[in-house]
Image: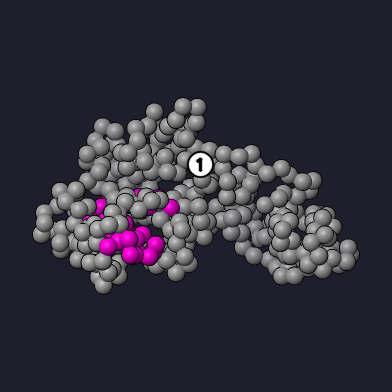
Amino acid sequence: MNERAAAAISVQQLHKSFGKVHALRGIDFTVPRGTVMGVLGPNGAGKTTAVRVLTTLLLPDSGTASIEGHDVVREAAAVRRLIGLAGQATAIQIELTGRENLEIMGRLRHLSWSDVRTRGQELLDRFDLLEAADRPAKTYSGGMQRRLDLAASLLGDPAVLFLDEPTTGLDPHGRLQMWSIIRELAQHGTTILLTTQYLDEADELANTIIVIERGQVIAQGTSDELKDRVGGDVLEFTVVDKSRVDDAVRAVAGLSDTDAIVDAETGRVALRVGHRGSQALVQAVRALDTVHTETAGLALRRPSLDDVFLAVTGHAAEADGEQPPSRGRGRRRM
């Protein structure tokens, strides 16, 4: 059995435009059954457009996509029976109670009243919403509304679940709760496609990751594989006197073949130093000492997915649809 035949999600050369805006420019990827794929990219990268095509909400201009072997265009009804979707905005009716929201969604999925009530009770319990089940959803916190929305997407026990930036707007506690739920779903064999702007989220939850920018897949692999693309360790430090940042960058420039990444507001400097480890650390101390620059937190660390995004795109992940930040001589601004 080939890779695509064994995949829960298969996408080949998918294109979608809105007038002159090319949202998808021929993306390709597969998601094996029972795994979590993280889809990284800033706003406007094409993540949500891809989800809307895969969940039959949009027709692609060209290319093919299938869910468990069913084409999303020719077999849309079969696809909808197999999937669940929790989008960026919750689909719940805030004037209704949590229980009523699940009952309506269950009936829309053509479940029997008996199944709706049984499954709804199970999900309210699973998502810690039983005590609030008979309160209007407008009285719920943001995290509770997100959990209710996710519970609604699971009423049909989907084989494939699409989570489009599910933790956007949640506080740290709410994010951790959602992470726990996603892990549990994955452990029980649900295939999950998770779009996110949070690099730590993909690092924490995803088996494999793709990075999308301007409608194209620009990197793909496991978290460790993507980090290896950065090229070894990262030397990082903060310049105490921010007016001396340029002096510090020039002092350590010889330790790397790439530009330093500089955050001018905080004085933080990061430099990829390959696999030289402690040798690079010693050389950095000496170089900074020669220019009499005081630093804090000088250390080596493994690359993060933030480093990966910067390495493959040339800019940070916060904004797309804009030109990459201009590069200063011998450095790159974050």
Q: Using the rendered image of the protein, determine whether residue 275 is visible from the camera's viewpoint.
A: no
Q: Is residue 13 magenta?
A: no
Give the colour scheme shown.
one colour
Picture coordinates of residue 332, whole percent (x, y): 72, 49
Pick out the residue farthest to the bottom.
Answer: 131
Q: Quadrant for residue 242, please give it.
A: bottom right
Q: Is residue 25 above or below residue 180?
A: above
Residue at x 24%, y 61% (from the top left corner):
97
In the image, residue 89 lies at what x, y percent? 38, 51
Residue at 26% across, 66% down: 135
Choose top left, top right, bottom left or bottom right for residue 80.
top left
- Magenta part of the protein: which range? 136-165
Q: Secondary structure at mark 1?
A: loop
Residue 40 in the image, given as x and y percentages of width and height: 49, 49
| Residue drawn at the location 29% of the way across and 50% of the way down | 84
Q: Residue at x 39, y 28 (%)?
A: 61
Q: Is residue 6 above or below residue 119?
A: above
Q: Amino acid at mark 1?
A: Gly
Lateral position of residue 250 relative to residue 33, left or right: right
Residue 55 visible at all: yes
Question: Is 4 rendered above or below residue 232?
Answer: above
Q: Which residue is mark 1?
A: 44
Judging depth in this view, the residue of 72 and 176 nearest the camera is: 176
